Amino acid sequence: MVEHKRIGILTSGGDCAGLNPAIRAVVYRAIGTYNWEVFGIQQATLGLMERPPKAIKLEIEKIDPLLTAGGTILGTTNKGNPFAFPMPDETVRDRSEEIIEGYRLLELDALIGIGGDGSLAILRQLAQQGNLNLVGIPKTIDNDVSCTELSIGFNTAVKIATEALDRLHFTAASHSRVMILEVMGRDAGHIALNAGIAGGADVILIPEIPYQIERICDYIRKRQDLGKNYSLVIVAEAVRTETGEAVTTNDSLGQSRFGGIGQYLANKISACSSAEIRVTVLGHIQRGGIPSPTDRLIASAFGVAAVDLIAEEKYDYMVTWQNRQAIPVPITDAISKYRAVDPNDTLVKTARSMGICLGD
């Protein structure tokens, strides 16, 4: 008989579709199978800094609507490293011990952290410092967490980007235009590559494969010579200029973020071709909305597996998806490097074999 436990769960980093189904699965498994108590920590580590800690008790009777709900009912944050936390007086402070104390005040036996590589690295550092029992679940629309074939949120983001390409086909054809779709992808081009193939893009540009503008222009001109008077280009936001410079913009807080590569390409392509060009930046639409069936399935499998790891007292592990199974790996392995697109990947070969231009 597994002893009674009080476990916490939090979502950290950027939001995405599939977080709520993961929370739902954790509650079902923890309460329905083991008769444990589950506390949802609000606003990630910020909630553990509050006194009393901001947490809500989660019950099976109230979680069924979470299966189709986007975002996260617990809230999240991707700002403020607790080891160098920005204060109102513009100083920074190490607030890690406050978070560890918050875990103790809630009398938790274990914590499930749902996040990307950055969030999981911070959570693990906290766990090591405070001797906390941590289990990780990977989530990121970029799908760049190492060791797992899928992360929560990726499939929905690909679905949304594919639907955008489907819609752009018709307006591109109607006006004989080149339509450029800029999608998210902080370090990796998985969204652009997957959606580009599924959505019938003519040009796919990803950070992992250097490109030349003239190659793209030649490709578009050849299409025009064949009577194909429109083209679709999909580009990951982290793609750089030909000279290797990042294209960024400043947000409302003055922080530099990727964005603008679509317009950069439009200016360059218009200078070397006669094509009329329009740019669409998909942005946070990729993070929102109802999670896809695949994301609901993966999130559910991850939630159940994470609870089972706690039951086995197997901590400092992250659940991964490998060969249609939920497999635990050490968190250190998962955060040691990010999962980029391999230029020799099957999907890269597929794109080339279908005549899609990758810019090189």
Image (cartoon, rainbow, N blue to C red):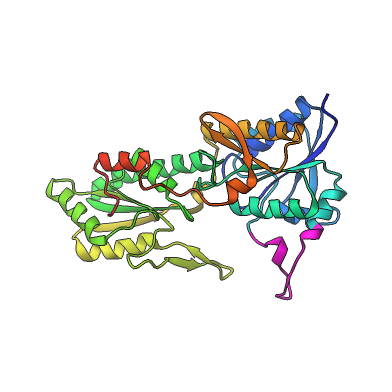
Asked where in the image residue 39 lies, by quadrant, the reply is top right
Q: Is residue 86 magenta?
A: yes
Q: Is residue 106 left or right of residue 293?
A: right
| Residue 115 seen in the figure | no
Residue 358: percent from left, percent from top: 30, 50
Viewer-proximal residue, 135 or 56? 135
In the figure, 297 relative to 160: above or below? above
Residue 356: percent from left, percent from top: 27, 45
Viewer-proximal residue, 265 or 144? 144
In the figure, 18 relative to 323: above or below? below
Tell me which residue sits at (60%, 43%) in the image. Answer: 138
**Outermost residue, left direction?**
225
| Residue 252 seen in the figure | yes
In the figure, 77 relative to 70: above or below? below
Q: Is residue 251 left or right of residue 5?
A: left
Residue 180: percent from left, percent from top: 33, 54
Tell me which residue sits at (22%, 61%) in the image. Answer: 214
Give the magenta range.
79-98
Q: Is residue 188 magenta?
A: no
Quadrant containing the C terminus in the rendered view:
bottom left
Residue 285: percent from left, percent from top: 50, 49
Quadrant containing the N terminus in the rendered view:
top right
